[in-house]
Amino acid sequence: MSTLAIEPAMQANAGDGASRIPGSVRVNERVIDKVIREASAVAIGASRDDVTVEAAEWGGGLAVRIAAKLPVPDLNDGEAIEIAVPVIERVRVLQAELAEQFARLTGREIRRVSFTVTGAVIPARKRVR
């Protein structure tokens, strides 16, 4: 199992701002993949089971590959179809949003986000009581 090295921690020092604390932090790739998968599922609006991810070192940062089923409106709902954003546009917006979120969550620079749409799912309607 490989690990990703993280920058040494910073410690506030009264005199000169911040100084480094000796030591290192290592995070298993499995943990990074899990964080990215959870964040992706929430952003996409899909079940975790419908999302697969892979993160790897690339160009001094991380490259992320996501494969997921996208939620789409019920094809019998004309209003929802009229206001729906095209799939390509939705995925481009998701790529940018997810890259920012992954960087914030992992503390790593995200160099690439590749997104493969593997299918479409119609979310179950929730009943109101």
Image: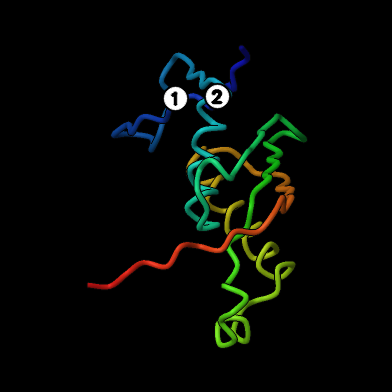
Amino acid type indicated by mark 2: Arg
Is the residue marked by circle 2 packed among few (<14), some (14-19), or many (20+) residues within 10 Å? some
Q: Which quadrant: the C terminus?
A: bottom left
Number of marks in the rendered image: 2
Instruction: Determine the residue positioned at 54% across, 20% down.
Output: 28
Q: Position of residue 82 (x, y in %)?
A: 62, 87
Q: Secondary structure at mark 1?
A: strand
Instruction: Determine the residue positioned at 56% across, 63% down.
Output: 122
> Residue reaching furthest left?
129
Please state which of residues 1 and 23 is positioned toward the viewer in this rendering.
1
Amino acid type indicated by mark 1: Arg
Please state which of residues 52 and 35 is positioned toward the viewer in this rendering.
52
> Residue reaching furthest front?
76
The reply, left or right, for residue 86 in relation to residue 51 is right
The reply, left or right, for residue 9 in relation to residue 89 is left
Q: Earlier in the sequence, mark 1 or mark 2?
A: 1
Disc 1 and disc 2 in contact, CB within 8 angstroms:
no
* Residue behind mark 1: 20
Q: Position of residue 68 (x, y in %)?
A: 64, 49
* Residue behind mark 2: 30
Q: Which quadrant: the N terminus?
A: top right
**From what the image shows, is residue 72 above or below residue 49?**
below
In this figure, which colouring scheme has been used for the structure?
rainbow
Q: Position of residue 24 (x, y in %)?
A: 49, 16
**From what the image shows, is residue 49 above or below residue 93?**
above
Distance Cα–Cα, label 1 vs label 2: 27 Å
Q: In which image quadrant can residue 37 be found?
A: top right
Instruction: Determine the residue positioned at 68% across, 45% down.
Output: 67
The reply, left or right, for residue 48 in relation to residue 116 is left
> Residue reaching furthest right?
59
Q: Secondary structure at mark 2?
A: helix
Q: Residue 76's mark?
A: none
